[in-house]
Amino acid sequence: MSLPSRSKRSSRTSGAVASYRILIKRSAAKELETLPLKDRRRIVHRIQGLATAPRPVGAEKLSGEEKYRVRQGDFRILFTIDDAERTVMIVKIGQRGDVYR
């Protein structure tokens, strides 16, 4: 029994994907530098994903503020989105108990 042949075409859409520019506040960069390498890599990967999907599944808007948050393990990444400028500003990175203070 033979399996049906798969098309050689890519499932990706052709053309350029509109992406956002990622900006990181100096204080957030310092918070990132203090994290263990394993956690830092995961968080950086998550931040890079915000360039193509600034409001990913699981992102929540913080009440009373124009900030959003995404979870990465025990850590939270707080950020703002400027759709007019097409930028995502990383404001704070930290463990869930400390990041909202």
Image (tube, rainbow, N blue to C red):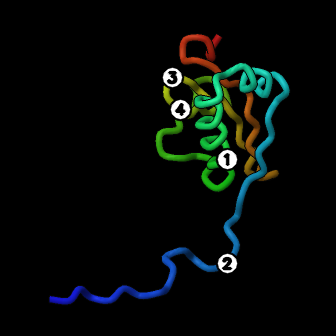
Q: Which residue is mark 1?
A: 48
What mark, if any, has residue 15 been given in the picture?
2
Q: Residue at x 54, y 17 (%)?
A: 96
Q: Is residue 49 left or right of residue 88?
A: left
What's the mark number on residue 72? 4
* Quadrant that contains the N terminus: bottom left
Kindly identify the amino acid type of the residue bearing the numbered disc 3: Asp
C-alpha span from label 4 to label 2: 30 Å
* First of labels 4, 2 by sequence position: 2
Question: Looking at the rendered structure, which numbered label has been put on residue 74?
Answer: 3
Give the residue drawn at x 60%, y 52%: 53
Viewed as shown, does residue 27 lie left or right of 7?
right
In the image, what residue type sits under mark 2?
A: Gly
Q: Crowding near pointer 4: few (<14 within 10 Å), some, many (20+)?
A: some
User: What amino acid is labelled 4 in the image?
Assistant: Gln
Q: Are marks 4 and 3 in contact (CB under 8 Å)?
A: no
Q: Secondary structure at mark 2?
A: loop
